Amino acid sequence: MKLKDQDTAPEKQADDVNLEDALGAEFDRMEASGEADDSGVEHEEVEILEEGDEEVVEAAAEGSEEDEVVDDSATETDEEELGYNQAAPERWPDDIKEAYNALPPEAREVMLERVFKPMQRSFTEKTQAMAQMRKQLDPMMDIMNRHSKNFEHAGVDPIQALNRQMEWSAHFARVGNEQGAKDLATAYGQVAGQEDTNAYLTPIEKRQQAQIDRMEQQLNTNAQNEQTRVQQADQSAVNARTQDVRNNIQQFASETRNGKPTHPHVEQVSAQMAGLINGGLVDRTDEYGQPVPYQDQLGQAYKMACSMSPSLRSAQDIVTRQEQVRRASAANREVVSKTPGSDVKIDDTAPLADSISDLYDKLDRSVA
C-alpha cells in the first residue's frame, strides 16, 4: 500500500499543478477553504480513498445512479465524498464533453456552475426581454406598414413621422387633451392667424430646419449677387459695344481722301442709314457667317442712303460722269502721244465733254 501511495502521489501532484495553471487564484481560494473545513472524519475518508479502496467507491457510485429518489442530506454527503460529478449538458459537442470530463472535479464545478450556467441564465433573460420588446415593436411596425405608401408618396420619413407622433402623444399626456389640442392647432397656424409652422417640430428637427433656413438664405444671397454680376457684365458689354459703334461712326464721318471728305453727305443721310441698318437691309455677316466690320456696314448703308435721295443721286451721277470723262481724257492723251500727229494739243481749259469731242475730231483728221 505504501508503494501505491508513492506511485499515486506524483500523479496527484501533476493534477494539482495543472489545476492551478488552469484556474489560478480561484482554485487556491477553494483549496484553502477546503483545508480549513475538513473534519477528522473527512480526513479518515480521504485516507481510505487514498489507500485504494476503488471497489467501494465504484459500488457507491453505481448505487447512487440506481437510486432515483434520495434525500438532500445523503446527496450532499455523497458529493463531499466523491467530489463534483455533474455530467456535461447533452447539447454540448463531443469534443467539449471530453475536455470537460477530463477536468478535475473542482474545475468541472467552476466551468459548469460559475461560467456556463450564469451565461445560460443571462442569455435566457435577454432572450425573454427581446421577446417582450418584440411584442411591443410588432404593433408599431404594423402601423408603419399600413401607412408606408402614404409616407412614400408624401416624401416623409416613417421614423420621423413616428417620432413626431410620439412627441405629440407625450405632450398631450403631459399637459392634457384640451391644452394639447390648443398647442397642436397653434403649431399649424390655426389660431388667430398664427403661422408658426416649426412649433410642432422636435428639438432636433428645429435645429435641422434652422440650418436649412440659413442655407436657403445664403443660396438666395448668392443668386442675387450672381444676377447682379451678370447684369453688370451685360451692361458693360453693351456699353463697350455702343462705344465701339460710336467710334466707328465718328471715324467713318471724318474719313478723308486726298484732303477731301470721303463721305461728305453722312450727316444728311444719317437717319436713312440708321433705318437701313435697323431694318436688316445691310448685311451684318458675310457668306461664311462672320460679322461684317462696322466700317463696311456703314459704307453699305451710306451708298444705299445716297442712292435713295434724288438730289444726292443726281450729284453723284454728275461726279461719276466727270470722273469717267477725266479718266478717258487721260487715256486719250497717252494714245495721242504715241501716234503720228502727236503734236495735237488739247485745250485743258475747255469743258471735259468738248475736249473729248475735239480730241476725237483731230484724231480722225490726222488718220485721213
Image (tube, rainbow, N blue to C red):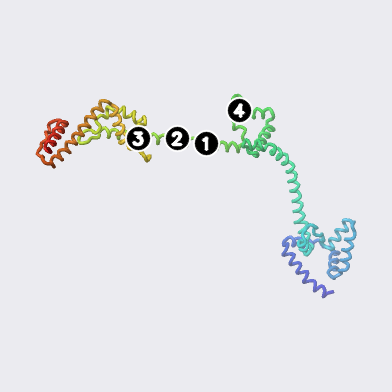
Name the residue rendered at 40%, 35% in the picture: 234
Please give the residue where the numbered disc 4 appears in the rendered image: 189
Q: Residues within 10 Å of mark 2 (few under 14, many from 20)?
A: few
Question: Which secondary structure, mark 4?
Answer: loop
Of labels 4 and 1, earlier in sequence is 4
Residues under numbered marks 2 and 3 in contact, where contact means CB atoms less than 8 Å apart:
no
Up the image or down, 185 lies above or below 216; here it is above
Please give the residue where the numbered disc 2 appears in the rendered image: 227
The disc label shown at residue 216, or none: 1
Question: Which secondary structure, mark 2?
Answer: helix
**Mark 2 belongs to which amino acid?**
Gln
**Mark 4 belongs to which amino acid?**
Gly
The disc label shown at residue 239, or none: none
Question: Which secondary structure, mark 1?
Answer: helix
Please give the residue where the numbered disc 3 appears in the rendered image: 283
Give the spatial CA distance, label 3 vs label 1: 49 Å
Of labels 2 and 3, earlier in sequence is 2
Location of residue 260 in the rendering, given as x and y in whole percent from the top left corner: 21, 33
Q: Indicate which label's residue lies in the foreground, 4 or 2.
A: 2
Residues under numbered marks 4 and 3 in contact, where contact means CB atoms less than 8 Å apart:
no
Name the residue rendered at 82%, 74% in the picture: 4
Location of residue 248 in the rendering, given as x and y in whole percent from the top left corner: 30, 35
Q: Indicate which label's residue lies in the foreground, 2 or 1.
A: 2
Question: Which secondary structure, mark 3?
Answer: loop
Residues under numbered marks 3 and 1 in contact, where contact means CB atoms less than 8 Å apart:
no
In the picture, measured across the screen, residue 222 lies left or right of residue 127, that is left
Location of residue 343 in the rendering, given as x and y in whole percent from the top left corner: 9, 39
